[in-house]
Image (cartoon, coloured by chain):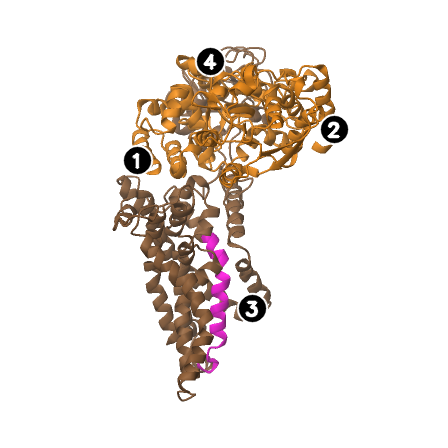
Chain colours: A orange, B brown
Amino acid sequence: MKPRILPLAVIGGLLLAACGTSNAPTSSSQQGGSVSLWAEWSSNEQNAFQGALQPYQTQSGTTVNYSSKGSNIDTVLEAAVAGGAPPDIALIPDPGTLQTLAKQGKITDLTSILGGLSSNYGSAWNTLASYNGKLYGVWFKGANKNTIWYNPAEFAAAGLSSPPTTWEELIQDAGTLKAAGVTPFSLCTDVGWPVADFWQNVYLKTAGAAMYNQLSAHSIKWTDASVTTAFTTMAQLVGTPTNLAGGLQGSLSNPYPACVDKVFPKAGAQPKAAMVFEGDFVSLEITGNSTNYTPGTTGSGGAACTADPAKTPCYSFFDFPAPSADSANKSAIQGAGDVAVMLKDTPQSEALMKYLAGPDGAAIWAHLGGFASPNNKVPTSAYPDPVSKGIAQALVGASSFVFSLDDLQGTWEKNMWQDLLDFLKNPSNVSTIETTMDQQATAGLGH
Amino acid sequence: MRMAARSLGRGHPTLRAVGVSTPAGAPAATLKADATTGRPAGGGGRRDQLGSLLFLAPAAIWLLAITIYPVVVTFRNSVFDETATSYVGLHNYQVIFSDASILVTFRNNLIWVVIFPFVVTFLGLTFAVLTERIRWSTAFKTIIFMPIVFSATASALIWRTIFDLDPHIGMVNAAVQTASDWVNPPGLYPVDTSAGQTAAAFASTGLSPGASGALQSSSTAAAGDTVQLGLIGVNVGTLQVVGAQTAVPPSPSSGAISGLVYRDFSPSHPTDRGQLFPDTDGLPGMLLTLLRSDGSSAGTATTDQHGDFRFGNVGTGSYRVQLDARNFRSGFTGIFWLGGQSVTPTSHLSQTAQALLSVPLVDLAMIIAYLWMWAGFAMVVIGAGLTSLNRELLEAGRVDGATEAQIFRRITMPLLAPVLVVVLVTMIINVLKIFDVILNMAPGSSQGDASTLALAMFNEGFTGGIHSGLASAIAVILFLLVIPAMVANLRRIRG
């Protein structure tokens, strides 16, 4: 499918470039030469990314030698840096690696190179790409884990015309859904990571990004009052089995993506719940279930959504809500992303970094789908549907951005998952679980 | 560490063979070599010995490198810290015996060892004896033996599906559902028992919980009155199934109690209760009983497509309308076979006692799956023993007038005992190191409840972070636990 679209993308890219919306300086045109570039993307994503780079290559005459390093790009890159043969530019999924490389002086300070282009990104993003107050990276791609997916037809059946915007509304809507005979939530908790993602969102929305990062580094204890607040808040939703498809046991035997299928079933089945939580990658699972699913709250041609996946079903999401008392954390986002860093300072790589920091490349990939950019200059019209537009807007407008806390816990990550599952099994047991978690965090992180 | 772990039972069949059987088998083989080649040659002198040593050298070096060395390193690491750099004494062992999540693995290993080897030997014996007597026995044997050829991972995944909670996926729950719904048909408006729901959750307007899962009107009614009863939380799918139509308010008629049972939820007014809106549905097919004030029945009725009902010829006195419990009877929603809930009653015990004494259902489900995998092996080994049995003894028994049961018990069994013990002990060793089935069959949410020593060793040593000290200590304990069974098996083989 992608190869057929690719030429379109190239043309689209050329058009965009021709329109003169480019922020890339024209002085760099026709400088020739080549740039080596590493990123984790392969197959379809690689095609899309290379399509996004095409205008730059055409314009400047520079060849980009792309190399896909898969998901262990961090390790590969660190080895290459240690071996003295790094690429010119690398896109890495871990801000921790950026910090390490910046500390070692292996990547270039971009502050003067990018100049005004850095304002294409919100401060949350630039902070994440900085070390010692200097900017070292460009967030080319972002992922949003702040998404609760819902079936608009199920909401309509319960008379709910708009999704909740606060945690209280979410609880209230869950009650309304139940009154209408619709099970509110499908939990993906056959394993620990989805419940960790869920808990982390609750913690981020109740305690805020600063506390989140402190907890992540274990500079506040897991027995902290903020942790208890997150647990009790979460229990308001998951502590009531009637809120969950299949009750507690149904949730504990509900693997990802089966939990998504319960809300967005394959043709021939009826939805078993109205909402499911996980990151933006859920949309792939939904459209994979049936190509009938239309992104947004209305179907194609404005047709009403139906619960029947054989007719005009829709899918949409709303931002993981914060309690109204914590509305300051409303736009804080948990997610992931790929940050471009420059390991060799050549005129070509400088030009490419500027191109990546500009909106043109991102707009091309955005148009192809499966992509969201934190770049505020990427026009929202570049996104093909309201759902991907919404995901990108949330990233652009993020007041703060945090990475998955569990992934930063090293050795005790699996214990953390098990602890959170234990909480799900017995939501009243918070203090014991917190004590256990704090001990495990101490043992795992060494402090 | 990695090699050490392999040698001590990662659970993979080939690794297991390399790890434990070889060091056990090797000395036996060496002894045999001495006995057969050494002695009859009449002590061929130094050169011959040197020659045999030379031939043995590759095997010996191989053995040293992949078995002895890892064992030694594992023992060493078990008294060192996580990075294997500083000596910590018995600290790792202390952790093992104080960490509840590791203690649970001892319980699970015990459950496996107590149940599995005996049942599989019994099954193998039964199959072996029976297949001797039937036609098509080769076909039967092939089918029973087939699972041993499948990879343990594939088998575990097959059984995970068979035991799935959802009756639409899991075969076992589908079978139970069919039986259960036949004996106990679900009502038109079933409650969701899996979420702990009861009929009381449906009561919204004019209703209160009645006797044994029924609902009844909150206020009394007399002849000529109308009653409106609103239910909340009625499944949208159910409405389609029962063909619900717009609710029509009841009209009073003299000498009768008429009324309406309706869905107290209107999509246009999602938060308003107790009112009828144009999009309010009646609830058809609801089975009703008119109750006298003493609770006895004064008649029955069923609601129509619009949710209306009427009890005619009602005498004087006050009545209540009951929505029978059978309306709300839940269908079978599935047994969580792969869950950590205990089959033994331990809820009144302390937390530690609970952890140590409960028998999680998932263990039993996995034992069943493992029986399926290994019954064929036991059958073949025992069958081989059976064919080599001295038939004359059986004939003699028959001539002496013994029944088949007596022959089996008094002649076959004692003669087969050595083979049975070999199967039993092999299986004990096998399940002490049980690993792959648990990793692949228990869902993540039950892994903690189902974990065994081998799995705990793997998790500590290879996933998340590397706790090499702890993992090595678990490996050492596992090794020590396997030794008695191994020694017993060796004695058998030699003797």
Front-most of residues A395 and A22: A22
Provide residue A204's location: percent of width, then percent of height: 42, 22
* Chain on which label 3 sits: B
The residue singled out by tag 1 in the image is A439
Q: Residues within 10 Å of mark 3 (few under 14, many from 20)?
A: few
* Chain on which label 2 sits: A
Q: What range is drawn magenta here?
A: B368-394
* Mark 3 vs 4, N-terminal side: 3
For numbered disc 1, what is the local secondary structure? helix
For numbered disc 4, what is the local secondary structure? loop
Spatial CA span between label 4 and label 2: 79 Å
**Nearer the camera: disc 3 or disc 2:** 2
> Which is the main secondary structure of the residues drawn in magenta?
helix
Q: Quadrant of the C terminus of chain A?
A: top left
Instruction: State whether residue B389 appears in this view.
Output: yes
For numbered disc 2, what is the local secondary structure? helix
Pointers 1 and 4 in contact (C-beta within 8 Å): no
